[in-house]
Image (tube, grey):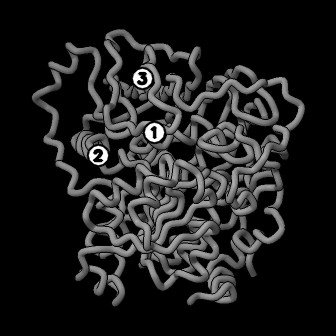
Amino acid sequence: MTSRRHFLKTMGASVAGLALGGVPALASAATPNLMTSRETADAKKDKVKVAFIGIGNRGEQDFEDFLNTGMVEVTALCDVDLDGKQCQKVLGQYLKVKRYRDFRELFEKGANDFEAVVAAVPDHIHFPIAMMALAHGKHIYLEKPMVRTFHEAELLMQMARRHPELATQVGNQGHSEANYFQFKAWQEAGIIKDVTAVTAHMNNSRRWHRFDPNIKHLPDAEPLPAGMDWDTWLGASQWHDYSEKYHQGEWRSWYDFGMGALGDWGAHILDTVHEFLNLGLPYEVTLLNQKAHNDFFFPYSSTILFRFGARGNMPPVDITWYDGLDNLPPLPAGYGGSEYNANIPSTNQGDTPRAKINPGKIIYTRDLIFKGGSHGSTLSIIPEEKAREMLSRLPEVPKSPSNHQQNFLLACMGREKTRSPFEINGVLSQVFCLGVIAQRLNAQLFFDPRTKQFTNNAFANALLAGGLPPRKGWEEFYSLK
């Protein structure tokens, strides 16, 4: 059994001395690592022992996706709301598996039972779970967005870099689907080049709330569901009384707990653009427009401009993000219809009507315009006449050797490298964190990617680490010495 003292000691060795602006350059995920004895042993196995943290709603979907690989041995189930109806389907399938409400107890008492963790929990609790998993030598599959604050991403990337023997994977599953391999092949063939602008849009009714933007305080306290461990649910966040307005996916609407539509869908829309164009961090993030700005929750709609500098022989790129039901982006001539990706998972909020423009992106280069959707949706060249002209020049796109869950499990066994590890996805997550700060402050912000500080707004710099210190008892995850 791994003790709390062992965890603190391990964390101290891993993160002591980390500073917000002083983390060394991260190694590329493509950097080869020597096979450890552990990896060699894992490569001989056919199944990975996995503990699941968060087993309702999206957690239930992840659970089924992993089971469908045939490569998982379920050894533990953990959820703060084990009595909730959303957890009963998974619990009913594994009546004899060990159960926990507090993930810290899972690691401290049950660490010998599993090799890997799958975590599908609210955004604000991603960081401590991932840090504890790596400190205990566990592979981890973490739902997107990777973290809630810029500083958390910085620490997690450094922690992953110090543990190259452990597989990390962020749950933007499109990174193992057709769009990933198409973008890579088209870029290598010179079809995608000289990108100057990208329009990213998320304009359907999924994930939207209708809270009153004129509220003066957080929601009033409501009776806690029977058996729910609310203290653990809050994690490092400052105390909030329980409210149903935070529960069952609604947490994503609140700055204190979620990353809004940008963090939720940006990971499915901008992942390949960010990775293959080597965008890194922007030098400017400007809130161009938003509706129902307030101190507590994400606006009804927003438009955010991210400006990235030149990289090598690639020109500067402007990315404009649009979200909200009534905030549609301008469309180029020949855009055509809006295609919907049938692989987008449903939510506990039920199916929603398709929007006039389904979530996706428009990529502008000096010579071509590409239209794409979200998740694994492939790109097409517009207008159609240009697409027909280019058809003979398009390279063959390789098939994915494994889906996202298989890719993670094979990496646990030492057979593949994960396609969306913390070292890659962490920077994209930081981009979203900067965008959320612009939303909160309703401001134009200038950012220095070298010092990782804003140059024109002290309040924005305070928000890089969340604005408030971790709650008592959770400091160890952030600043151990």
Circle nearer the viewer, 3 or 1: 3
Q: Which mark is residue 260?
A: none
Question: Which quadrant of the rendered structure holds the C terminus?
Answer: bottom right
Q: Nearer the viewer, residue 186 or 437?
A: 437
Q: Are marks 1 and 2 in contact (CB under 8 Å)?
A: no
| Mark 3 lies on residue | 358
Kind of residue at disc 1: Leu
Which residue appears at 53% of the width and 33% of the height? Answer: 349
Residue 371 image-quadrant placement: top left
Direction from residue 232 to residue 73 in the image, left or right? left
Question: Which class describes the residues within 10 Å of circle 2: few (<14), some (14-19), or many (20+)?
Answer: many
Identified by mark 3, the residue type is: Asn
For label 1, the residue is 270
x, y percentage for residue 3?
64, 88
Q: Which residue is drawn at 71% across and 36% down?
A: 438
Secondary structure, mark 3, is loop
Choose the circle earlier in sequence order: 1 or 2. Answer: 2
**Foreground tag (1 vs 2):** 2
13 displayed left or right of 383: right
Residue 441 image position (x, y, % from top left) = 78, 35
- The residue to which callout 2 is attached is 177
Left or right of 102 on screen, residue 204: left
Q: Can residue 446 be seen in this view?
A: no
